[in-house]
Structure formats: structure tokens, C-alpha cells
Amino acid sequence: MHWHPNPGSTLNSQILVEACGCAEALGGAKDGRWKTSIFFYRPMTRDGGAAGAVGQQQQQHPDLPRELLGVALHTSGRASTSPSSAHSASSSRPTPRSLRSWRSSSPTRLASPSTSRPAHHKVKHRKRPPQTLGFERRHRIIAAEMAPHRLCKKPRAVKATAAAAADALISLPRDVLDEILTRLKLRDAVRTSALSRAWRHRWESIPSLDINIPWGQPPLWAVDSILLRCSGRVRGFQVDLDELSLRRLHDWLLVLSRRGLENLVLRPHEYNFFPLHSTVFCCRRLVSLDLFTCEIPPFPQGFEGFPDLKVLSLRNVKLHENGEYQLEEIIETSPLLDKLILSEICIAGDNFIEWEIRAPNLRHLTICSHVDYGWNFAEMPYLRSAVIDFWEYVGDRDFAEFVAGLVQVTKLTIYTYAPVNRVKILETLVTLPCMFVNLTNLKLLVDFCELAPILSIFCFLRSAPNLEKLKILICGGENQSIEATEEFLNAQWVDGMCAKLQILRVTETNWLPNEISFLKLILSKARLLCIVSVSHADGCFISHEEPLLELQKCTRASAEAQILLKGPEEE
């Protein structure tokens, strides 16, 4: 495109912007990124002489401009549009009136520097005067400012600052960096590879890490890539196993057994039993073992136990026939065992022998089962809390002797519902063979429609002189088979019972007469009682106004006793 301003006019950036827009429209460079270059050049006549050369200024045509303005467009993926190409493109389009008049009145044909010339025609290029270099440089700067800026995700200053901070952090001592990365979650530790090149593979040298795959994410690819790239010790391994990862579990356990695994949590993604490989017994450095919905394999040859195991949780697991022997050996060969949970375990077979839980350092015990698998308690001097949930106790053994093995506890929960052998339990629970001197918190599951559960409450209250908190969860129906009157309950009371009781909580009440009589008895006997909290059952259709009014009017041994009514959602 050949363009020159009118005589006497002054060039500015706005005129140059319009000239560039015109060149863009003529060249058709509207797509993609493009760059504009503006420069001045002198026209050449056909005879090869410079129009502005010294000595030929007299022969220059009066309509011929001394200097022409050239605009070049450089686009990505397109051929650059030079002044000659712009001129050829303009020949196929309507020419502005000013250019048509100039071309028709000019007898001399012009050629731009980029126009092709015959081979025999030689052009002598003259050096530009020194004063024109500054003018050209200035217009190149203007052209650079007019080019569109590329979008950048981060400013260079921000990138430089982040890189400097990362480099400053990487310069810390190795043990300090290891401590920082060890305290991070594995996902965050891997993300440090984006800080700089020095951090790209730094997380792979972590001395110890925890692998915890969130629920719902496929663990196969993640676990394989981590175990292959990171050779450090694996402290914890917790995954929800899907169908594909179950096939690799044996290989993972074999690798983890050589990496000093301490915490292992395995559960299936769906509620289906999966066979556990015997490699799990090779992880001798385990501190915590949590298995859910799996089949425990037999011991491998040479099994020596878990010398460092402190937490053992077996929930909804299956053991082969005579699995009680295996369970007893696992507990006995874990001398540091502190917490034991046996919930809904299933042992194949019908006949079970009596065996003992030998854990001298055990502090917390939970047994939830609807079948008596013959367990007994050896001496456990450090036991502090116990939860015994025999939902339907059917054993023929002495239940009082069984409970006496928990005499050291300070917090006890006993849930026994609808025992089949009620006569046996009633005879053994009249008095316990021992006193729970350390017991301060007691939770009981009681059916006030039957006589045996009511008597069991007084049996425990007589054997716990230092009891401070009592919580009773009421179960059963609304039809009383026996009426426990106030006279009958007073006959069960002995001196020193509930002497230190401060809080009584009764949940799921149906406001039966036996329940109200028991509450009135505690209010009239407990001298240190502060709070009596009562919550009614969801399906209770009896209004609580009259029972509460009756409790408010009864005699109270403690002037500070308060009666609170709470809904089921507040418990």
C-alpha cells in the first residue's frame, strides 16, 4: 500500500493506527495474531535512479512524492503482507479517489523495494543519511507499541518472585525440607513439583509418606505410580478397594511389608466380602490394623505376631473354622495392644471353645456380637473403658462372672436385649461377685417391661459406689408384663447406692408407669443429683405434660436437681 500525507500535514499515532487498519483490511489479515511494521522509503523510477538522489531532484516529476510510507503485516500461519503485496491486493479492489487521481496524473511508474526486477538491472543502494536513522527507529518503536499484546497467564514479575521464593526454600537443609514435605498431605506434596525445576522430583525423595485415597476415586493408577516413583517408608495406607485394585492388593501388601508399614485400613468399595491375602501377616511393624468386610486367611508359616501393634479393629470379618484360636493368637502376640474392637465377626462352625483375651496393656475394649463365641477376659489391669453389646445373649455361661472380668474399668457400656436364658441371668445378677470401685460412667440398655432388666439396673448400682453418670437407653414395647411399683423399687434400694450420682439421662422413654417410678426413686434418693435429662421416643403417643408435672411434684433429695426434657434430635 502506497500512501503519503498531504503537504504540510503532521503525522501522529492516530494517523498511523488508521493507516495500519487500512493495510489490514486490504491485506485480509484479520485472523490470528499479527504484527505491524511501519517504515519510510523513497520511490525508484524505471531508469534505476533514486527520486530523491542528489543531482536528480530537478528531473523528479512534480506529482511524485519524495517519501512513501510502507506498512507490512506479519501474521502467524500466513504469508507476510509486504508493501508490494498490499499494492497488488489493492488492484483488485476499488481504489480510493485520491489514489486513482494520483496514478492517472503520474507519467512515471513506481516500483517499491520489494518489487521484482530483471536480472540485468542493477540497483545501487545508497546509504541513508545519518539523520534519517533516528526517524526510522522512532517509527519502528511506534509500530511495536501498536502491535497487539499477547495474553500471559502470569506476569513475569510474579513468575520471577515465585521462582525466587522456591529457590530460597530449596536451599534449606535437606532434613528441614523432608520435615516440611512429611507434614504435608500426599496430594499437596506432589503439587510442589510445579514450583520450579528443582522441585520437580523433590517429593519422590520423601523419607516417609501416607497414602490415603479418598472414597470414590480409583486407587489403582494412583497407588501404582506412587509406589514406583517414591521409595521412602510408607507410614499409612488407606484405600477403598474396587474390583481392579483387589487384584493388585497382594502385590501392594508385599511392597508395603518391606516399606515399614505402620497403619493399614482396608475396606471394599462395595459391601462385598473380599479374600485377604496372608501377606498382611508379614507387616510386622504394624501399629494400627483396621479391616472391614473381609475374610481373614490362615497364618503363613513362621508367623510371629505383631510386636508393635496398638490398635486392632475387626469389623464384619469372617474367620475359618476354629477361628477363635487364630483370634486368640493374634491378640496374645501383640503385647502392646491398647485398643481392641471386635464387631460382628463371624467364625465358621457351630461349636466354640472358651478362650481368653490376653492383653495386659489393653485400655479400650469393644465387643459387639449376637453370638457367644466363648470369649473370656484374662487379667487386664490397665483397662479403662469397655463396650459389651450382646444384642441377644444366648450363652449358658455365668454372665456375672463374665462381666466381673471388667472390674477395672471407669467407663462401662452394657447392651443386652431380650436374653433367652433370663432365669439364668436373673439368678446371677442379684449380686455381682466384685465391686466396680473405679466405675464413674455407666450406660445400660434396659427394657422396663420385663423384671430381669430392671433388677440388673439395681445389681450394677449396688456394685458401683462411685458412679457419677448414668445413662439408660430404653428398649422394648409398650406393654408391661410386670408392674414395678414404688414399694417394690424401694425394696431393692440399699444404703450407699447412687451416693455420688450427679447426672441421669434416660432416652427413648415411652412414659410407662415403671419408667416414671424409677425416675421418682432416683430423685428421692440421690443427694448429689444435678440433672435429670429425659427424651421421649419417636413413636410415643403419650403426652409428656402429665408425667413431667408428676416428676416436678415428687420429693427430691437434692435441691439442685433439674428436670430437662429433650427431643430425640438433641441426644
Image (cartoon, rainbow, N blue to C red):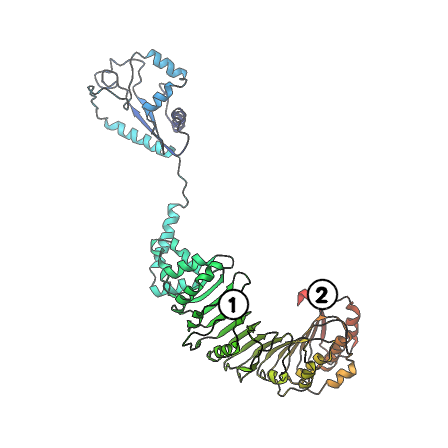
Residue at the image position 45 percent from the left and 66 percent from the top: 236
Quarter the C terminus occupies: bottom right
Q: Position of residue 215 (x, y in %)?
A: 51, 59
Snapshot quadrant of residue 536: bottom right
For badge 2, the amino acid type reads: Asp
In the image, taking residue 163 as reference, residue 503 lies left or right, namely: right
For badge 1, the amino acid type reads: Cys
How many marks are shown on the rendered structure?
A: 2
In this picture, is 85 found above or below 534?
above
Quarter the N terminus occupies: top left
Q: Position of residue 3 (x, y in %)?
A: 35, 21
Q: Disc 1 vs disc 2: which is toward the camera?
A: 1
Q: Position of residue 151 (x, y in %)?
A: 41, 40
Residue at the image position 20 percent from the left and 22 percent from the top: 124
Residue behind mark 2: 538
Residue behind mark 1: 294
Mark 1 is surrounded, within 10 Å at the Cα level, by few (under 14), some (14 to 19) or many (20 or more) other residues, namely many
Identify the secondary structure beneath mark 2: loop
Q: Could you say which is closer to the camera, residue 292 or residue 11?
A: 292
Residue 476 appears anywhere in the view: yes
In the image, taking residue 2 as reference, residue 407 lies left or right, namely: right
Identify the secondary structure beneath mark 1: strand
In this picture, is 433 found above or below 44?
below
Q: Could you say which is closer to the camera, residue 471 or residue 349?
A: 349
Q: Could you say which is closer to the camera, residue 474 or residue 141?
A: 474
